[in-house]
């Protein structure tokens, strides 16, 4: 693949191990090259810049070489390269857990989700004549989703890696403007390393793009040497450098005639698109649900019990404009085909058939079946092909399961810190609420169990709640009972649950909910992920820049940053 752009980009992630690359423009408009890498790990920060390589001492990280650095980490992960090219080797434990420009590595999906963007959505992109995707939506939708603009998430300083804008790029790279194209091509074919190697074809194209032979021949030799340092005992499913696309994915098992639905209510409780209960807390703006350009954000605000929150408004960002549901009322753009019903509870229908129904305290979100295998956020992923094992996919694209609390779904602990808080929106350019509408606060460290009731009349209150909290077999009953016992307030949660049930009734026609049973059992065991964890996986970024993903697929992400 061939991601361009200017600025800082996430190259590869596995858990807390993150590799960022700096892309800087070259003389040809829209074409970039690497200019340094930073690796953030549990053992500290490693920088490879023009100033040299810096690593923390006394933590078990080993480094070899002066011009080209081969760095080995305590868990067996490795990087090898210099400021212009880097190969990243993750252990087999990262199978089905990678993300970034190096792509997802999921044998269970037959590697169909290589190009999973930062929102967790994936699709394939056509190959360019550079034998991998370039420009177009590959750059704007996939590659630029991994651009790092939030200062709190950056690993480079602005001086080390200036942020710039990526021009709109066509799906084909620029044609050579060299005076001696055929002579240059002949030399490049001979001097660009192993003709059957990982970097040969990209080197030839770089020479013809920039009309510079020596620079790219030397860089390709370095890149080949780097790869030789890390290629022992690795698995590369698509090692053949031919321009053909990857094998067709296995069926995604989606029934696109059925819609999918997620609800957030109470303090707050989320019933994911799969139907799994969860209880994300926190203060501030959170991504509730995403499908493509359709984004729903929720505002969480604290209540009197420490660490417990409730919803206080929602904003829906769509291709038809911005819809806000706040204490000031509901605002929708006019004349674009969005229909709204109700005054206190709003049911809003969008031109594509998507719907939301609710008020400031609770919302049900209904996406069409086209969103199957494309959702993300607190409402979770919806992937029949994975037997719904990736519900709790965080904002980096990593997923795992979390244990149920006595509230019949995950609460606190790493569910909050790793999954829920990854969907917190802190970058001002990504916020849909203003700070006045939804103040940002910190989330205290929460235990994996919610607080015990401190009400004086617990059993009497429980008995009333069991009767008044709506349908005993319904979607919201158990959460209502827990909210009453947490806050010692009966009327507030009974009224809200009635609203939530009414909201859900507006959207529950023709929907599929795999785990509709509200029992506390976890979802069905996932199908085998087909990972051979005895084999490592490897990704390379080189040239201007060309990325060979963990799966071996070529791509060409540009951009500056």
Image (cartoon, rainbow, N blue to C red):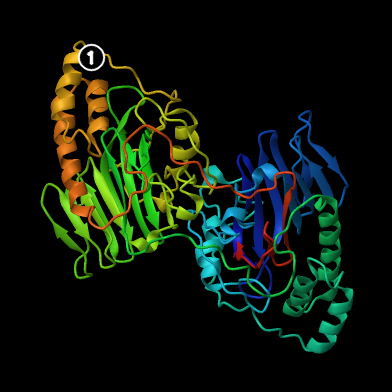
Residue nearest the observer in this picture, 135 or 526 = 526
Number of other residues with Cα within 10 Å of mark 1, as a class: few under 14, some 14 to 19, many 20 or more: some
Give the x, y percent position of residue 59: 76, 29
Along the line of sight, the residue nearer the viewer: 21 or 521: 521
Q: Residue furthest top?
A: 456
Q: Is residue 248 visible?
A: yes
- Position of 260 with respect to 148 (left or right) is left
Q: Nearer the viewer, residue 75 or 286?
A: 75
Where is residue 454, by image quadrant?
top left
- Relative vertical location of residue 227 with respect to residue 139 in this rendering, above or below: above
Identify the image quadrant of residue 291. Answer: bottom left
272 up-or-down from 484: above or below: below
Instruction: Please state the horizontal and vertical placement of residue 171, each as a whole percent of the image.
Output: 57, 77
Q: Residue furthest left?
A: 343
For the point 61% across and 39% down, which residue is it? 16
Relative to 546, 52 lies left or right? right
Q: Give the secondary structure at mark 1.
A: loop
Q: Disc 1 marks which residue?
A: 455
Label tally: 1
- Work out whether residue 180 can be spotted: no
- Residue 227, located in which quarter of the rendered image? bottom right
Q: In the image, is 508 to the left or to the right of 547?
A: left
Measured as percent of width and height from the top left, residue 41 is found at 67, 38
Quadrant placement of the N terminus: bottom right
Residue 491 sits above or below residue 356 on the image: above
- Which residue does the image show at 12% across and 47% down from the upper left? 344
| Residue at position x 26%, y 48% in the image | 364
Quarter of the figure with the C terminus:
bottom right
Location of residue 436 in the rendering, given as x and y in whole percent from the top left corner: 29, 42
Residue 16 is left or right of residue 208, and the answer is left
């Amino acid at each position: 693949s061939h991601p361009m752009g200017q600025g800082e980009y996430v190259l590869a992630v596995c858990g807390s191990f993150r590799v960022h690359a700096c892309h800087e423009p070259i003389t040809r408009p829209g074409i970039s090259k690497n200019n340094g890498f930073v690796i953030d790990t549990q053992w500290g920060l490693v920088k490879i810049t023009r100033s040299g390589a810096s690593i923390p001492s006394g933590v078990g990280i080993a480094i070899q070489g002066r011009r080209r650095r081969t760095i080995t980490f305590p868990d067996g992960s490795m990087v090898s390269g210099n400021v212009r090219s880097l190969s990243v080797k993750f252990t087999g434990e990262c199978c089905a857990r990678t993300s970034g420009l190096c792509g997802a590595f999921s044998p269970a999906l037959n590697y169909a989700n290589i190009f999973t963007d930062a929102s967790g959505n994936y699709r394939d992109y056509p190959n360019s004549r550079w034998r991998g995707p370039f420009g177009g939506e590959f750059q704007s939708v996939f590659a630029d989703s991994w651009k790092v603009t939030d200062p709190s998430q950056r690993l480079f300083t602005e001086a080390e890696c200036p942020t710039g804008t990526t021009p709109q790029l066509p799906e084909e790279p620029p044609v050579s403007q060299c005076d001696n194209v055929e002579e240059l091509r002949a030399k490049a074919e001979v001097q660009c390393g192993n003709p059957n190697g990982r970097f040969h074809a990209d080197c030839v194209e770089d020479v013809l793009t920039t009309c510079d032979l020596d620079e790219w021949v030397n860089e390709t030799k370095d890149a080949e040497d780097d790869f030789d340092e890390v290629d022992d005992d690795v698995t590369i499913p698509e090692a053949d450098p031919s321009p053909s696309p990857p094998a067709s994915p296995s069926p995604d098992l989606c029934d696109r005639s059925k819609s999918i639905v997620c609800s957030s209510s109470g303090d707050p409780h989320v019933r994911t698109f799969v139907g799994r209960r969860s209880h994300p807390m926190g203060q501030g703006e959170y991504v509730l649900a995403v499908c493509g350009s359709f984004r729903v954000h929720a505002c969480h605000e604290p209540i009197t019990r420490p660490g417990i929150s409730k919803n206080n408004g929602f904003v829906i960002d769509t291709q038809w404009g911005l819809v806000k549901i706040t204490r000031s009322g509901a605002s929708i753009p006019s004349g674009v085909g969005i229909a709204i019903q109700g005054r206190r509870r709003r049911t809003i229908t969008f031109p594509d058939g998507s719907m939301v129904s609710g008020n400031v305290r609770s919302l049900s979100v209904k996406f069409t079946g086209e969103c199957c295998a494309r959702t993300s956020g607190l409402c979770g992923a919806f992937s029949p092909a994975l037997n719904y094992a990736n519900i709790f996919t965080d904002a980096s694209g990593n997923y795992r399961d979390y244990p149920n609390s006595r509230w019949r779904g995950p609460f606190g602990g790493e569910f909050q810190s790793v999954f829920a808080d990854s969907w917190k929106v802190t970058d001002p350019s990504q916020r849909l609420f203003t700070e006045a509408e939804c103040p940002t606060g910190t989330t205290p460290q929460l235990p994996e169990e919610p607080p015990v009731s401190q009400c004086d009349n617990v059993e009497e209150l429980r008995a009333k709640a069991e009767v008044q909290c709506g349908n005993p077999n319904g979607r919201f009953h158990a959460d209502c009972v827990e909210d009453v016992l947490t806050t010692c307030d009966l009327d507030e949660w009974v009224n809200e649950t009635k609203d939530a049930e009414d909201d859900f009734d507006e959207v529950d026609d023709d929907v599929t909910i795999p785990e509709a049973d509200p029992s506390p059992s976890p979802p069905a065991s996932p199908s085998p992920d087909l990972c051979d964890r005895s084999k490592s996986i490897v990704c390379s970024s080189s040239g201007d820049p060309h990325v060979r993903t963990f799966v071996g697929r070529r791509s060409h992400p540009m951009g500056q940053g």
